[in-house]
Image (cartoon, grey):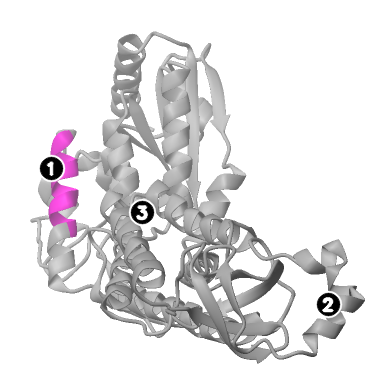
Amino acid sequence: MNTRRVFALLAVLLAIAFQAAASDEIWVLRIDGEIGAGTVTYLREGLNQAETAEASLVILVLSTPGGLLNAGLAARDLLLDTSIPTIAFIDRQALSAGALLAIACERIIFAPGGVLGAATPVIVSRDVLREAPEKIISATRKIFRATAEIHGRTPEIAEAMVDRDVSIANLIEQRKLLTLTDLEAAQWGYSDGAAGSIEELVALGGMGVATIVEYQPRWVDRVVETLTLPMVAGILIAIGLLGLIIEMLVPGFGVFGLIGIACLGAFFWSHVLVGLAGWESIAFLIGGMVAIALEVFAFTAVDFGLSGLLGLVLIGLGFYTAMLGPLSSSTQAGQAIVIVVVGLLASIIALIVLLTKLPKTRLRLGGMILSTAITGGAFNKNREAQSQESWIGRIGVAATNLRPVGAGEFDGERSDVVSEEGFLPEGTPIVVIKDEGYRKVVRRDVR
């Protein structure tokens, strides 16, 4: 390292140290490997804790080939919003989305052999990499430019990392993508010095007495990374919707509702944390569930009508908007549509199968439990004798809300029933129209 660069680095770090003397702690956050959803949650919590500890400096160690553009954009916003001075320490490479994070930091320090750049957006389609459409490249180019301008760096250099059409004399010719070495970065204002390690960086800044705090990735970051995978998201959608719809059809509140809420909660929780899902996505979901509830309870559970279809559309929009960021490509949008449609169809098909089988069995979880079996009534000899008699034509009342499954009371005897008309409120006069043993179909008695 030459003398000029040593003194430049020393001046920079001393200035930062004097400006942020509230604490002698220096927090180190590391981004290794690809940038994804877990990176955003890791960075958010790390910066929050560093601010709580009143750290004097955050060093972001970068060794990444890049990753998801939307995740990189969310992480960039976190770095720009933090009140703590930040230094990007490029340990080997900060490419693609990693380059954006480096430029978002107030200072950039290179390890020997470090490189920065190569940030043109690409799309993976059938295991083939191709450049993103011009619309996304243009937007990404301006984001890089604006980020560079915030910290007084030459914006054209940041643009040349993204767009092959940008050329800079004596640096990069047109149709080439810019990647800077540590020496080139120092020459063109994208490096504030060089250091072989974190300890050397701190020592060069005259902060040898500072306490270095290594912030480690958490299990929740890995969970968020998993929950936002397309396949996992589709499974959460299917199981979550199925659980809630079944809960609407059975009395009480039980395990199906808990499973549904847990799955949908996990889906939106993970997508909100990474900055994809907003209040509009949740509003779509709630609106869709209300529409389906009206279809089941107020209209009919047999003929699925306009309210039910509107509910499915709104729910689909909720999931769709929660899976896309501001710079998602058409390929990602198509993937999100497929995931949502498959999830909805899977839940509907499973629901149809359950509705055809559920009334014929005594095994029901949650709202419907083996009430007669538990009390021993199922083995009462008098009940066995009565079961041989036909129930068709017997008149009674709905002992619970029928949604359409519930309980009816007939001359003091209680039995599980299924309403042919869909929802019937408790106390409605009913008559048995079909008797299939444990499955007794009723309708409203209008006599």
Tags 1 and 3 touching, CB below 8 Å: no
Q: Earlier in the sequence, mark 2 or mark 3?
A: 3
Query: Is 293 placed left or right of 374 in the picture?
Result: left
What kind of element bears circle 1? Answer: loop
Q: Earlier in the sequence, mark 1 or mark 3?
A: 3
Tags 2 and 3 touching, CB below 8 Å: no
Q: Amino acid at mark 3?
A: Ala
Please tell me whether mark 1 or mark 3 is closer to you in this view: 3
Taking the magenta stretch, the answer to whether it contains residue 143 is yes
Q: Could you tell me which residue is drawn at 14 percent across and 48 percent down?
A: 145
Q: In the figure, 72 relative to 371: above or below?
A: above
Q: Which residues, given as a range, are shown in magenta? A: 140-150
Q: In the figure, 431 relative to 99: above or below?
A: below
Per the model, the C-alpha gap separating discs 1 and 2 is 87 Å
Taking the magenta stretch, the answer to whether it contains residue 200 is no
Per the model, the C-alpha gap separating discs 1 and 3 is 24 Å
Please tell me whether mark 2 or mark 3 is closer to you in this view: 2
| Residue carrying label 2 | 383
Query: Is 353 placed left or right of 291 in the picture?
Result: right
Quarter containing the N terminus = top left
Q: Which mark is residue 128?
A: none
Measuring from the top left, give residue 209's x and y in whole percent: 53, 11
Q: Earlier in the sequence, mark 1 or mark 2?
A: 1
Measuring from the top left, give residue 296's x and y in whole percent: 41, 71
Measuring from the top left, give residue 326's x and y in whole percent: 23, 58
Q: Amino acid at mark 2?
A: Arg
